[in-house]
Image: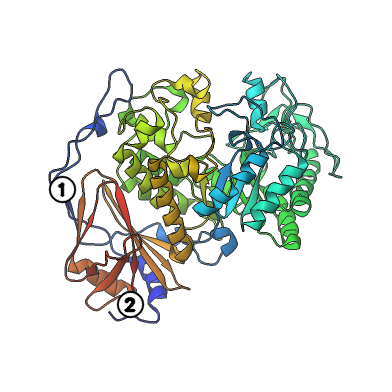
Amino acid sequence: MIISNLFLWRAYKSLIRLSAITAFVTLALSACGGHHHHNNNHDPEPQPDPEPEVNRVVQISQLAADGNAAQLNTLGCYDQKADKNKCSIVMYQVIAGVYENGGDGAGWGYGWGPSHYLGTIGGVTKALDYIKDLGANALWMGPIFYTEPYDLHPYGIDQKTRASGYYPSTHIKIDEKIGTDESFRDFITAAHDRGMQVILDGIFGHAQDGFVQPEQIAAQLPELTSKNYGPDGSVGVWADHNMFFDWGQENAENLVLTENYFKELAAYMITEYHIDGWRYDQAYQVPPASWGHIQESINQAAAQMNVSGYTVGELMDGSGNMIKRWGFEGGMDSAFNFPVRYAFTKVIASDEDKKGERKDPAELRGLPATEIETYGFATMASSAVAGKMYNSFLENHDLVRLGDLIQYAGYVPDGENDTVLANEEYRKRQKLSYMFLTQMSGPISIMYNQEIGDQVPYFTIEKDNCGTADYFFCNDHVSRTDAVSSEEALSEDQKELRDYMKELLRIRSEHQALWYGSRFHLFSDKETYIDLKINSESKDIVVFIMNTGRTNAEISITADVIQQLCNNTGALCTDEIQLENLLDPEDRPVVSEETVITVDGLSGKLYQVIL
C-alpha cells in the first residue's frame, strides 16, 4: 500500500466529487414475509421471515454519489474544528425519581410511565460508578426544581405532571420530594470527581401558574401569560392557564425583562452550583435570538468556571426547519438529532403509533436502509449551519423505547423482560442500534437502561401498562421505567447488551474518526449501508458497514471500486487496502482485485483502514 502525506485531505475534498451510483445488487435470497404483512386486527403479531438458506450477495461496482457530504461536513464535529470537549460528549440521561431512594427525600410515589417514582438525587449519585463504567462522560439530569400542588394544567393530568418537574413553581430550589440542596451539590461533586459533566434540564418557556421569584436571582421575575409560541413561530392561547413566560408574545416590552432573568439564571447555576451546561425543554417557546443572548451569558460563566457551557435544545422536528431556526441560527451549541432518529428506527424497528391510531405495523416499519441517507442525513445537511452540532440519540423520556418499537413492528413477540431479552433477534437489533449511534460524529445521548435493551412488558398489546389508557400520553411517557443502578442487578442477557455498548463506547473514545470525523456515504440499498469516517488530524479512517436484513450479506467489492477509491483520494492504494475489524482484530480482510466481506444478518462492522 502506498499512502500519500496528503491522503486524508484529498479524501475529504475528492469524495465530495464522486460520480453517480450505479450499484449492481444481486439478491440470492430477498427478505420476505413480515415486512408487508397486513394484520386485520392491527395488533402487532410477529411475522418472522423463514430461516435464510443462502447468503444475500451485494456486488458494489461503483461508489455512491454523496450529495450531502459538502454541507453535512460543515456541521460542528464533522468539520473537525469544533470544541472537542463538546464533540466527545456521551450524555447519559437520568431522572431522579426512577432511581433508588438515596435517603434525601421521600420520592413522589407516582408519575407518568411505569416507574415506582420513589427515587431521589441521592439514588442517582449511587449509580454514578455504573454509569461511568459504561463509558458515559456526561449526565443529563432531568427536572429537579420545586413544584407546588396544582390542578390547572389544561390536560387535567395534575399530580403526575407535577411529579415530572416540567412545570416548576420556582427555579434553584430543589424539590424536597427528590432531594435537597446539599444532595444536589454532592451529586455534582461526585460526577466531577469521576470526570463527568452535569447538564441540567432547563424549562425556560413554561412554568406553573403562580411561579415564585427565586431569592438568589436579582433580575425581575418574568410575567406569565396564556399565550404560547408554537413550533411554527405562531402564537396560540391556552385560555385560563397563565403558564408561559412572556418572551414578547403577550407584551413586546417584556422580552428584555424575561431574557435578562434567564441569562442570570443560566449563569448562576454554573457559577454557584458548578453545573457544566443546559438541556432546553421545548426550545421553540423562546425566540431564537434570545437563545443566542443566553448562550453568551453561559459562555462567560463557563469560561470563569472552566467548564464546557454545553447547550442542547429539544426541537422535535423531522424536517430540520425548527432545528435550524431555533437551535443553530438561534445560537445554542446543538440540537437533538430527531431526523436521523426517526429514519433509523423505521429501518431497524418501527415508527411510533402516533396518538394511539393503532395503525397496521406494516405502515410504520420496514423502510429501506437508504432512508437513513436520503431522509436522515439529507435533512441534517439541509439544516446545517457551520460549526453547529447535532446531538444524536435513539431513546429519550418522551419517545417509545426502541425495544418496544421492535415489538410493535412484529419482529419479536411482546412479553416479560426475560422472555424478550432471550430472543436473539431482539438483542441483534439492539446491538445494531448501539453501533449506529456510537459511530455518529458529535455528541451523543443514551437514555438510562438503553444499554440493557429495556422495554415495557406487553406495552404493544396492553397500552394501559404505562399508567394510562390514553394512547397519546402512553406513547409520550412509557419509556420512564425503573432505572438500573448496578451491574449486580442485571441478567446475563442484559449484561451481554451492556458489555457490547461498553466496548463500542471504548472504541469510540479511541477513534476520533467516529466522534470527530467527516462522513462520506459510500453505498446503500434496501438492507445494506456503508459510510466512511475520516479524521485528518489523527489520520484515523473507519469504514462502517451495516446489514439491516435478517439474511447474511456477502458484500463483493470489485476492482473498479478499488480503483475509484485510489483515483478519487489521490493515493489510497496501488493494489490493495488493509482493513481491521475493531471488534474482532482477527478479521483483517485485504481489499484487492475483488474482495468479499461477509456481514451477518442484523449486524454491523467497524473496519479501521490500516495506514
Q: Nearer the viewer, residue 597 or 96?
A: 96
The vertical placement of 566 against 424, above or below, is: below
The answer to whether residue 394 is seen in the rendering is no
Colour scheme in use: rainbow
- Give the total of numbered labels: 2
How crowded pointer 2 is (Cα within 10 Å; few <14, some 14-19, many 20+) is rated as some
Residue that badge 2 annotates = 570
Q: CA distance from mark 1 to mark 2?
A: 33 Å
Residue 318 image position (x, y, % from top left): 47, 41
The answer to whether residue 153 is seen in the rendering is yes
Are discs 1 and 2 less than 8 Å apart at CB?
no
Q: Nearer the viewer, residue 513 or 295?
A: 513
Give the secondary structure at mark 2.
Answer: loop
Look at label 1 and name its amino acid. Answer: Leu
Choose the circle earlier in sequence order: 1 or 2: 1
Quadrant housing residue 8: bottom left
The vertical placement of 312 against 146, above or below, is: below
Give the secondary structure at mark 1.
Answer: loop
Look at label 2 and name its amino acid. Answer: Gly
Residue 274 image position (x, y, % from top left): 73, 53
Residue that badge 1 annotates = 27
Residue 75 image position (x, y, % from top left): 51, 59
Q: Nearer the viewer, residue 112 or 497?
A: 497
Residue at position x 30%, y 40% in the image: 424
Residue 424 bears which disc, if any?
none
Residue 587 image position (x, y, % from top left): 27, 64
The vertical placement of 576 against 356, above or below, is: below
Q: Is residue 442 left or right of residue 234?
A: left
Q: Is residue 271 left or right of residue 428?
A: right
Q: Is residue 563 left or right of residue 391?
A: left
Give the position of the N terminus as an image quadrant.
Answer: bottom left
Which callout, 1 or 2, points to the residue nearer the camera?
1
